[in-house]
Amino acid sequence: MTTAQTETGLAYRRVLLKISGEALMGEQNYGIDVNVARSVAEELKAVHELGVQVAVVVGGGNIFRGVSKSAGNMDRSSADYIGMLATVMNAVVLQDALEKIQVDTRVLSAIDIPQLAESFIRRRAVRHLEKGRVVIFAAGTGNPYFTTDSAAALRALEIKADIILKATKVDGIYSADPVLDATAELFSAITYRQVLEKELKVMDASAISLCMDNNLPIVVFNMRHTGNIRRVVLGEAGVGTKVG
């Protein structure tokens, strides 16, 4: 960590934000709310201006999900590839929102779509981050049967991120669904193994296991509270739940 970064009190130098496609939907039932994309971009800009190297993995559930009812009896591989294309659309929307507020951004895709995105190459991604660009990873891992949670864990390890920031619509990890159970307990910290044993719906089991095997911490936090990403990277207490 550089002197400038130390002086700003950064807890993390390089982060990977995992944001669902549904988060970009806002209050709509389908698609992308450009106002939400703009809001996310503003949050990322605030963190980027602190000197943090920011990467993003975006889901595609607001458009299409391979395991959703809308996939019907479609072949799972075909459905998952369509879901990957949905993540590319979301990534380009987020890129546009970032560049409209003067944040240099690159989209790197796990499937080749040269007209829209660069092909994912690990060293290229790291170089973009070192040059101060926000990097958005699209198309998951490029393989069917793997979720964008798994892609987030994989990409975070490949770029040697200090932490995964898992953006949600609740304040962290609860013992039960807080929407359905008013007595649900909010954890300030929890271990990977507890997440797996309690079958808590944080990220899918393969993503949690990958993080556990490589000691990659995760912070689950509420994206709807303005400034929360900044608070996490500054190491403020009481924001979200830390998994480690």
Image: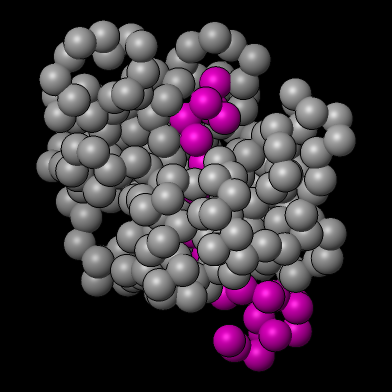
**Left or right of residue 109: residue 56:** right
**Left or right of residue 206: residue 110:** left
Quadrant of the snapshot with the C terminus = bottom right
Where is 107 relative to 10, above or below? above
Residue 119 in sight from this viewpoint: yes
Along the viewing direction, whichever of 115 and 228 lies nearer the viewer: 228
Q: Is 3 inside the magenta-drawn segment?
A: yes
Residue 107 in sight from this viewpoint: no
In the rendered structure, which segment of residues is drawn in magenta? 1-25
- Name the residue furthest bottom: 3
Q: Position of residue 160 (x, y in %)?
A: 40, 74
Question: In percent of the image, x 81 and y 66: which residue is there?
Answer: 236
Q: Is 104 inside the magenta-drawn segment?
A: no
Where is 170 relative to 214, above or below? above
Along the viewing direction, whichever of 132 and 210 lies nearer the viewer: 210
Where is 162 relative to 116, above or below? below
Locate residue 167: give its quadrant: top right
Locate residue 219: give its quadrant: bottom right
Question: In percent of the image, x 54 and y 9: which residue is there?
Answer: 29
Along the viewing direction, whichever of 174 and 92 lies nearer the viewer: 174
Q: Position of residue 130 (x, y in %)?
A: 41, 73
Quadrant of the snapshot with the N terminus = bottom right
- Name the residue furthest front: 197
Q: How many marks?
A: 0
Q: Position of residue 185 (x, y in %)?
A: 81, 45
Along the viewing direction, whichever of 7 and 75 lies nearer the viewer: 75
Locate residue 52: give its quadrant: bottom right
Question: In percent of the image, x 52 and y 26: which residue is there?
Answer: 22
**Left or right of residue 41: residue 208:** left
Where is 191 relative to 144, above or below? below
Question: In percent of the image, x 85 and y 30: which residue is there?
Answer: 182
